Image (tube, rainbow, N blue to C red):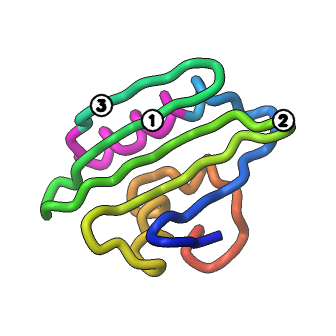
Amino acid sequence: SYHFGTLTIELPPEVRVESATAASRAALARRGYTIRRTEATADAGCVIACPPRGDQLVTVSLDQKLELTQMSVKIEPWGDRASAEARPAQSGLHALCRVPRAGFP
């Protein structure tokens, strides 16, 4: 879902926060993003990165819920739905998402 500049994705229950955080960090770094901060526990994780060109800030947040892991992607400033949906595919995060819809090849 997309709400107030944040794209939220529900990952399968077997995806753990620590693993998804590490995979998000690796995918962003592999694409040339500068990693500003990475934090992870069993319950919550966060990766903050800057794209190779531009002045945007991409924040990937992960939270363990009762039966799933929730991933949120926020682009600041001025993130819109189209750029938020494109960002996981551009950064390599789409492999984590497993969402079969436009914007996530």
- Picture residue at 40% right of the left edge, 35% below the top: 25
The C terminus: image quadrant: bottom right
Secondary structure at badge 2 equals loop
- Say which amino acid is labelled 3: Arg
Foreground mark, 2 or 3?
2
Q: Nearer the viewer, residue 57 or 53?
A: 57
Q: Is residue 39 magenta?
A: no
Residue 16 screen position, x and y as percent:
69, 28
Q: Main secondary structure of the magenta part?
A: helix
Disc 1 residue crowd, few under 14, some 14–19, many 20+, Cα 10 Å: many
Secondary structure at badge 3 equals strand
Q: Are marks 2 and 3 in contact (CB under 8 Å)?
A: no
The N terminus: image quadrant: bottom right
Disc 3 residue crowd, few under 14, some 14–19, many 20+, Cα 10 Å: few
Determine the CA span between mark 2 and mark 1: 19 Å
Disc 2 residue crowd, few under 14, some 14–19, many 20+, Cα 10 Å: few
Query: What label sits on residue 97 in the rendered view?
Result: none
Report the residue marked by disc 1. 46
Determine the CA span between mark 1 and mark 3: 8 Å
Q: Residue furthest right?
A: 67
Q: Nearer the viewer, residue 56 or 94?
A: 56
Q: Which residues are magenta?
A: 21-34
Q: Are marks 1 and 3 in contact (CB under 8 Å)?
A: yes
Q: Residue furthest top?
A: 41
- Picture residue at 51% right of the left edge, 31% below the top: 45
**Displayed quadrant of residue 39:** top left
- In the image, is residue 82 above or below residue 58? below
- In the image, is residue 7 above or below residue 83? above
Report the residue marked by disc 3. 37
Report the residue marked by disc 2. 66
Sequence-wise, the earlier of marks 2 and 3 is 3
